Image: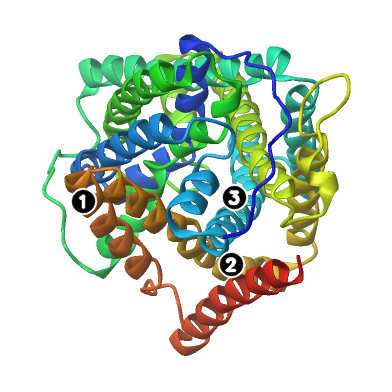
Amino acid sequence: MRETATAPELRRELGLRDITLFAITCIIGTRWIPAAAHVGPSSITLWLLAALLFMMPLAVAVAALSRKYPGTGGLYLWTRNDFGPWHGFLCFWSYWIGIAFLVPSAAMFYMSAAYPSGGRAYLLIASLAAIWIALGTNLVGMRIGKWTENIGAGATWGLGILLIVVAALLWKQRGSATPFDLVPKWDWDTVSFWALIAYGMSGLEMAGLIGGEIHDPERTLPRAGWIASGIGTVFYAATTAAMVVILRPEKISEMNGLAEAGQTVAQSLGASWLAPVMAALVLGSAVGQFGGWGSSVSRLPFVVGVDKLLPAAFGRVHPRWNTPHVSILVFGGLASFLLIAIQLGDTVRAAYQALVSLMVVTGFFPYLYIFGSAWRAGKRVSAVSGWAITVLAIVTSVVPTSEVRNVVLFETKIALGTGAVVVTAWLLYRRR
């Protein structure tokens, strides 16, 4: 095994409150609420199953591995130490590429949800602004950057509480718009949706990436993980229930469902202020999530650069801010490039939909390593449960939905794209 270098010291700026809010921001994505509500009340059961079988085992794994391997790097550090440098690099590369491709789609959702009538120029400018405001605050250090994630977590919870309150008022006024049947209908669409549900429950591992910046990480990170996991489960189940009380599932679109719910409530309750308040909360949630993603994922190429598996610049910290500035700037640049590329035309956007499915595959791949390390750490039950859900999510993500017309082309893109991620990882690894 190759000798690894020692990472430059990063400042420990995060306490229990900060890392808990950071984890909540990384786990909870308001973009998944209308998608789940579109399926109907049965998705509440899927949320609870995903929490029991995936999120809780992930919390056990992250807590155990953070104690076993404290420091910056998280899943790369765990995989490298347990399975060797090549597997560590492949785990890093797959995870980093997955997040970089998902940021543009998330930006488009949040900006569209905040202002549905905005045109393409608005969508592009607002998305770029949100990404760089979030990354910029983290570029100058976690002392300032942590407030981006803290505000994002507060905005997310504010949106959730607001949805629950107005749904309760509507229920009292005219009852639920949707009959509550919590038993999932096990067809191919539900099977395909399972990957989305499981992905919505992921994100806790991001807190492990910044272990080197947490006060007493062996004690703080496990506590924050359990708190954030419980809050995430309650949030998703409650907000999905609130959405289907407000509107029937067939009237909730995955892209503009939050705006549609806000308009319905505003008309029913005569609350004209509701739509702009929801828009502001959506924007705050977006900036916080981008900051959490960018600041944590940027630590991966930083640690890999320290190990000399990437150019040395990735392993440097800013002389004034003590942050991995090169990694943050490269991540922001790649996400911005992909966001602009999406806007080039309908053909590019159609191809991007297949890439989103591809990134679910590559995004889940690192969890095989995470739960493998959990097995080695003695967390056998959590490892088996996590493995099972990970494999199920990967398989269901390549199951084409009824909207896919050319199944062969769809599956070919997924296979070639997954192969490209592995091949590029091998070429970069061998070159260094």
Q: Position of residue 321 (x, y in %)?
A: 82, 20
Q: Identify whether 257 is placed above or below 420.
A: above
Q: Secondary structure at mark 1?
A: helix
Q: Position of residue 394 (x, y in %)?
A: 37, 65
Report which residue position mark 1 lands on: 385
3 or 1: mark nearer the eye: 1
Disc 3/disc 1 C-alpha distance (Å): 24 Å
Q: Which mark is residue 355?
A: 2
Q: Quadrant of residue 212?
A: top right
Q: Is residue 38 visible?
A: no
Quick one: label 3 or label 2, which is nearer the N terminus?
A: 3
Quick one: label 3 or label 1, which is nearer the N terminus?
A: 3
Determine whether, in the image, residue 97 is placed left or right of residue 322: left
Residue at (16, 63) in percent of width and height: 186
Report which residue position mark 3 lands on: 99
- Callout 3 touching callout 1 (CB < 8 Å): no
Determine whether, in the image, residue 202 is placed left or right of residue 171: right
Q: Identify whether 70 is placed above or below 41.
A: above
